[in-house]
Image (spheres, rainbow, N blue to C red):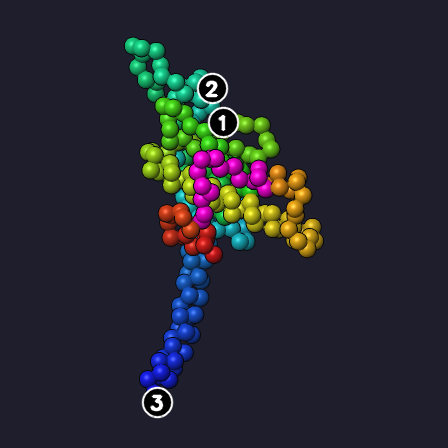
Amino acid sequence: MHAGQEDRSARGLLFPLSSHSAFMFVCLFQAENMLRLLDIQSRLGDSTFVLFQPGRRLLREGVLHRLKEHYLLSGSGACPLADGVGEKEVEEEEQLVFVFNDLLLWTSPLFSITGSVPLSELQYLPTKLPLLPSTIWLARKGKPFSFDMVFRSKDMAEHENWTGFLQAAIHSACGLASAAATVSNGATRAPSSLANQRTAHDCIKLVTDVAPIRPHDIQSPRSARLELEF
């Protein structure tokens, strides 16, 4: 047998092994995700909230601090205090934040649900407080603004990581929601009306001086990379 034939034969044997390995890896990832969802569900204080849904995947989880509404309304963090007055303590509460492929959920450290919003209904607001630059502002599209989704990360490095990841996750969820709506309406081609263009523009609001963030640009945990790249 010639060397070239042996090489092709070896590649032919390796291909099925590679396919089986990839399949096993996906199965393990799905099993790990399912166990984590069931674990979070069992810890939640609200038995009426059904977290486990077909197709729902956990992309990222971590700790952020949610700023209290009266602290934000008082203007603290937006401007320096008068001379001779010490800096006012930041009024915030620790939150466990879970980013799924279709949902944002945040709870107390004891897993009591504080809030949840479908990702396709969220938008990131490029707003910062001068004295608290690591704040993360989120809002519901088409709804009056409320202060229940203003979070703070521990530093600017974590802030950039979280905001980049959230923008990519929101963008992905909006795209899936738009595709599902197109299929359900029986459309045969992509919408092109001005109204639809405005809807797509409102779907993800990015900082104007920053290039759009693509999913594969995000430095995220292994599970997040898998979900955003698949």
Spatial CA distance of label 2 from label 1 is 9 Å
User: CB under 8 Å between callouts 2 and 1?
Assistant: yes
At label 2, counting other C-alpha atoms closer than 10 Å, the crowd grade (few under 14, some 14-19, many 20 or more) is few
The first of marks 1 and 3 along the sequence is 3
The first of marks 2 and 1 along the sequence is 2
The answer, for residue 45, to whether it is visible in the render is no
At label 1, counting other C-alpha atoms closer than 10 Å, the crowd grade (few under 14, some 14-19, many 20 or more) is some
SS of the residue under disc 1? helix
Q: Does 54 appear above or below 93? A: below
Q: Which residue is mark 2?
A: 73
Q: Which mark is residue 1?
A: 3
Span shown in magenta: 200-215
* Amino acid carrying mark 1 in the image: Phe
Q: Residue at x 47, y 23 (%)?
A: 69
Examine the residues drawn in magenta and state their main secondary structure.
loop
Q: Does 182 appear above or below 90? A: below
Looking at the picture, tell me which residue is in the foreground, 213 or 129.
Answer: 213
The first of marks 3 and 2 along the sequence is 3
Q: Could you tell me residue 59's position as x and y percent? A: 44, 48
Q: Could you tell me residue 68's position as x and y percent? A: 44, 25
Q: Residue at x 60, y 33 (%)?
A: 142
Q: Quadrant of the N terminus?
A: bottom left
* Amino acid carrying mark 2 in the image: Leu
Q: Does 157 appear above or below 36? A: above
Q: Which residue is mark 1?
A: 147
* Amino acid carrying mark 3 in the image: Met
Q: Could you tell me residue 153's position as x and y percent? A: 37, 34
At label 3, counting other C-alpha atoms closer than 10 Å, the crowd grade (few under 14, some 14-19, many 20 or more) is few
SS of the residue under disc 2? helix
**Dot in front, 1 or 3:** 3
SS of the residue under disc 3? loop
